[in-house]
């Protein structure tokens, strides 16, 4: 089975072992040559002979004679050099050392060439290679000798110190001498590290510790930062010029520690420091600070916290300023302004660092939700813009403002409150025909849609649909009137009706009033027409938000008055009476006294007074039931058409309350839905987990109060959606 | 960029030319003579090529005056193969010659060749 393998080793004649005397002769030949080289004499022997001699010795297994001999010769030579170098005084010392070293290195290269065969074929670890042996002997007998090492390091460090103080030194000499420590290191530059680098780094730290302490107490933070930057550039250059590159990171770290890390707190707190820079938008100084702080551990955290703290503080001031609390427009405008300002700081100084942006956003979130005014203020701000505030802006500017609005909106935790207010003001804009541009309205809504999804804007979009359908319905009604039999009996009036789908629109507080018979008839006609066209629908008249135009005939002139429905009703009363008390007005129109007050006020106290109070009293006086008014027949006005504000633009407190109540009602439903959703999928859950889960689910819309969630849970238990576990009262079970 | 699709043909031509360079006895441009073997067979060679290929020769030619060298202990066929390697990077070594080749290769500091021969010896 197995085949015998015959290994044939080719015949080779082994060289005869050399006689000792012959070996000695060859060594002496080589020794002479080496000594010649060491004395910088051109060798009298040819390379070929020397190479062949060392080759012959090695091949004849006499390499040991050569190697130990070489060691001795090097030993002897370096010891001689030590004396020569140590004798040199002052600056001569460095020059002498350097020139001897340069020569020695060259010699070692030449010796290596001659003994190349020895090097490759004889030297085995842990023996040193021929060249390394030369280096080792130099290190052992010259460099780390007590007469040299300390003196050399002190002089080198002294020169570096001088250079740091602005003097010019011989860079090439430095490089050569420092490189010597690297060259004589056998592995991982250990001699360089132990003998030179360590002391150099220590001296560096020491130098910059005292310099930075002195400089920062006598200069501004900006000047100090510039100084640090220059110092770091200098040290980078120093590495390139004469240090070993492995020192680079250590040196820079030492400098950064002394110059930056140790003074970070000071730079932030000092009078000319970080705070002042942020306050005064010193973008360049902040940029420099960012760049430098970035280099040290946790540096940016300090800077970021300081910046975020400032942002929070500024925001806090703005949202609590009394003037701003009264004027939503000013409030939002200043918020947009500081947002712009901080965005500029972020991009110009902080390289739009993600962490910085996030912490600024967190700051905005915190102060924007400090009080509950913001949702409404933001809605009012947009309201003003969309009522015509955008008139003088171009598309691009409008887009910028809208995006800022969305940005602020994003920070609101109670988005549902904002939504209610927004819907409320949108409804008012649409119904009063005060919206500046439907396109802009839709653009704004589409931005909310992008941000929060369909659900958020479905009602708003429904309002626009209603507006369109109303127009169709009205056209249809007009055609219907022309063909109607009853029409012939009625005087013509121009009536416009808007049909609003319940649910899309905010519910307006119900008010009743008595319409004049004519208008009443028209309303009935419309109801008849509409319910015929759309079976199953019910119409509820909301007269309180309507408008009307009436003709006001004066003895010499005729005016058209643009009024609210209520004001029209009041004015019509004067067709049959000269003087009326407020009480009588209320009785004649069935309008609540409060609404009477609000409606009458612009008619007698505005710029154009169509009513006057008799007897005349001070304007400021509160109206009472018994105050009597009559028509102002002496009205002087150049305009043909006079417009009266129905009510003040911002909502009255009760209306606002009403909006809030509705938000609360909606929240209850949302929380119920969330609880049921969670319990349906989880079946059983511990109280706290349910609260957490519920809060999480709703956080995109609002932050629910725990007490409210608790109440809803109780309520759901009553309605038998959930039950408590009999043995563990803190656990709930879902009842399908 | 013009692509040379005849790379291998070109390479072969190149190697053949270099083969001739040291085998051709009427080589006028030779500036260095290597004599080898007991009969001192003469190879006409070129300092520029030798010094580029072998560290030993590079150091040897630092002495400008040198233009001849003798290696009586190296047999002619071995020397020829070494030179063939130096000039053309081609090698065809029979098993019986491996050790002899290794010694000369080491002597001339032909490190890559030495490594190759060492591996061959281990394999055999």
Image: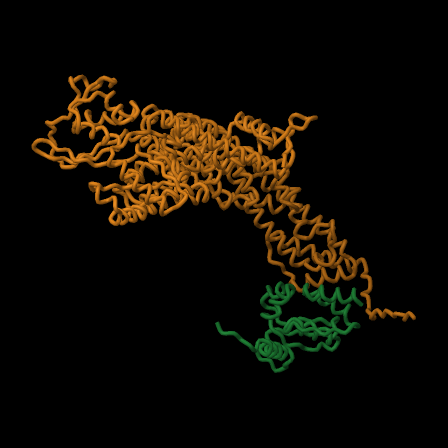
Q: Is residue A207 visible?
A: no
User: In terms of image quadrants, where is residue A231?
Assistant: top left
Nearer to the camera, A320 or A189: A320
Query: Along the line of sight, which residue is nearer the eye, B73 or A478?
Result: A478
Q: Quadrant of residue A600?
A: top left
Whole-percent x, y for residue A449 in the image: 43, 44
Q: How far across and how far down the image is residue B54, in percent?
A: 64, 66
Quick check: B37 left or right of A318? right
Residue A465 visible? The answer is: yes
Residue at 69% in and 52% down: A129
Q: Is residue B16 above or below residue A665?
A: below
The colour scheme used to paint the residues is: by chain
Q: Residue at x 71, y 71 (%)?
A: B71
Q: Is residue A222 left or right of residue A247?
A: left
Q: Quadrant of the N terminus of chain A?
A: bottom right
Location of the C terminus of chain A (image quadrant): top right
Nearer to the camera, A251 or B37: A251
Tint of chain B: green
Relative to A482, is A11 on the left or the right? Answer: right
Q: Tag count in the figure? A: 0
The colour one sees for chain A in the rendered image is orange
Residue closest to the far left: A556
Res A307 → quadrant: top left
Residue at the far bottom in the pictured view: B26
Q: Is residue A494 above or below residue A329?
A: below
């Amino acid at each position: 089975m197995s085949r015998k393998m015959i290994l044939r080793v080719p015949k080779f004649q082994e060289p005869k072992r050399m006689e000792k005397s012959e070996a000695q002769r060859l060594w002496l030949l080589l020794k002479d040559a080496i000594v010649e080289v060491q004395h910088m004499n051109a060798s009298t022997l040819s390379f070929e002979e020397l190479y062949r001699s060392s080759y012959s010795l090695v091949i004849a297994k006499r390499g040991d004679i050569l190697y130990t001999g070489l060691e001795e010769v090097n030993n002897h030579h370096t010891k001689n050099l030590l004396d020569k170098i140590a004798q040199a005084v002052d600056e001569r010392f460095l020059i002498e050392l350097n020139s001897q070293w340069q020569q020695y290195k060259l010699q070692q290269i030449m010796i290596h060439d001659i003994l190349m065969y020895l090097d490759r074929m004889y030297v085995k670890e842990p023996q040193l290679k021929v060249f390394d042996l030369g280096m080792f002997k130099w290190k052992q007998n010259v460099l780390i000798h007590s007469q040299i090492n300390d003196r050399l390091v002190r002089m080198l460090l002294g020169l570096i110190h001088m250079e740091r103080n602005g003097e010019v030194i011989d860079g090439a000499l430095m490089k050569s001498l420092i490189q010597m420590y690297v060259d004589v290191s056998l592995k991982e530059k250990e001699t360089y590290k132990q003998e030179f680098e360590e002391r150099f780094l220590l001296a560096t730290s020491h130098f910059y510790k005292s310099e930075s302490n002195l400089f920062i107490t006598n200069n501004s933070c900006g000047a100090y930062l510039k100084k640090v930057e220059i110092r770091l550039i200098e040290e980078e250059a120093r590495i390139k010029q004469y240090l070993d590159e492995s020192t680079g990171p250590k040196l820079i770290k030492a400098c950064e520690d002394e110059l930056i890390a140790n003074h970070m707190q000071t730079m932030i707190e000092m009078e000319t420091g970080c705070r002042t820079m942020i306050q005064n938008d010193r973008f360049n100084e902040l940029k420099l600070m960012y760049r430098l702080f970035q280099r040290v551990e946790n540096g940016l955290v300090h800077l970021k916290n300081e910046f975020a703290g400032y942002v929070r503080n500024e925001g806090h001031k703005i949202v609590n300023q009394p003037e701003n609390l009264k004027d939503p427009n000013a409030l939002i405008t200043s918020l947009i302004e500081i947002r712009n300002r901080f965005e500029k700081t972020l991009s110009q100084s902080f390289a739009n660092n993600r962490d910085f942006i996030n912490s600024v956003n967190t700051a905005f979130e915190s102060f924007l939700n400090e009080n509950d005014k913001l949702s409404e203020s933001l809605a009012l701000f947009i309201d003003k813009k969309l009522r015509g505030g955008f008139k003088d802006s171009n598309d691009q500017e409008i887009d910028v403002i809208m995006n800022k609005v969305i940005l602020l909106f994003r920070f609101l935790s109670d988005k549902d409150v904002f939504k209610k207010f927004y819907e409320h003001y949108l409804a008012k804009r649409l119904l009063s025909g005060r919206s500046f541009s439907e396109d802009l309205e839709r653009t704004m809504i589409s931005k909310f849609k992008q941000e929060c999804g369909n659900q958020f804007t479905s009602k708003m979009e429904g309002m626009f649909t209603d507006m369109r359908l109303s127009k169709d319905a009205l056209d249809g009604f007009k055609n219907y009137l022309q063909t109607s039999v009853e029409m012939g009996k009625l005087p013509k009036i121009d009536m416009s009706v808007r049909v609003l789908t319940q649910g899309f629109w905010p519910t307006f507080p119900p008010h009743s009033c008595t319409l004049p018979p004519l208008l009443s008839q028209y309303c009935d006609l419309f109801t008849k027409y509409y319910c015929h066209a759309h079976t199953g629908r019910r119409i509820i008249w909301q007269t309180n938000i309507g408008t009307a135009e009436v003709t006001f005939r004066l003895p010499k002139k005729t005016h058209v008055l643009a009024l609210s429905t209520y004001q029209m009703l009041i004015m019509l009363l004067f067709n049959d009476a000269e003087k009326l008390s407020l009480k009588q007005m209320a009785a004649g129109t069935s309008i609540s006294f409060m609404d009477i007050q609000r409606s009458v006020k612009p008619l007698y106290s505005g710029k154009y007074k169509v009513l006057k109070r008799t007897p005349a009293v001070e304007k400021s006086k509160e109206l009472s039931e018994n105050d009597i008014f009559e028509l102002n027949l002496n009205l002087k006005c150049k305009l043909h058409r006079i417009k009266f504000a129905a009510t003040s633009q911002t909502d009255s407190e009760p209306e606002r309350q009403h909006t809030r109540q509705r938000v609360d009602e909606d929240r209850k439903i949302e929380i119920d839905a969330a609880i049921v959703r969670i319990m349906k999928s989880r079946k059983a859950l511990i109280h706290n987990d349910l609260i957490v889960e519920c809060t999480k689910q709703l956080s995109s819309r609002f932050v629910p109060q725990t007490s409210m969630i608790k109440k809803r849970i109780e309520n759901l238990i009553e309605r038998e959606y959930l039950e408590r576990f009999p043995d563990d009262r803190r656990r709930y079970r879902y009842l399908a | 960029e013009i692509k040379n699709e005849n790379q291998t043909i070109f390479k072969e031509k190149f190697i053949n030319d270099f083969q001739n360079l040291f085998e051709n006895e009427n080589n006028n441009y030779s500036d260095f003579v290597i004599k080898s073997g007991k009969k001192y067979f003469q190879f006409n060679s070129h300092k520029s090529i030798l010094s580029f290929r072998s560290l030993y020769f590079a150091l040897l030619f630092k002495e400008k005056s040198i233009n001849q060298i003798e290696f009586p202990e190296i047999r002619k066929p071995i020397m020829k193969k070494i030179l063939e390697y130096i000039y053309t990077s081609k090698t065809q070594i029979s098993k019986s010659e491996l050790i002899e080749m290794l010694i000369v290769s080491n002597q001339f500091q032909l490190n890559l060749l030495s490594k190759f021969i060492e591996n061959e010896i281990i394999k055999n």
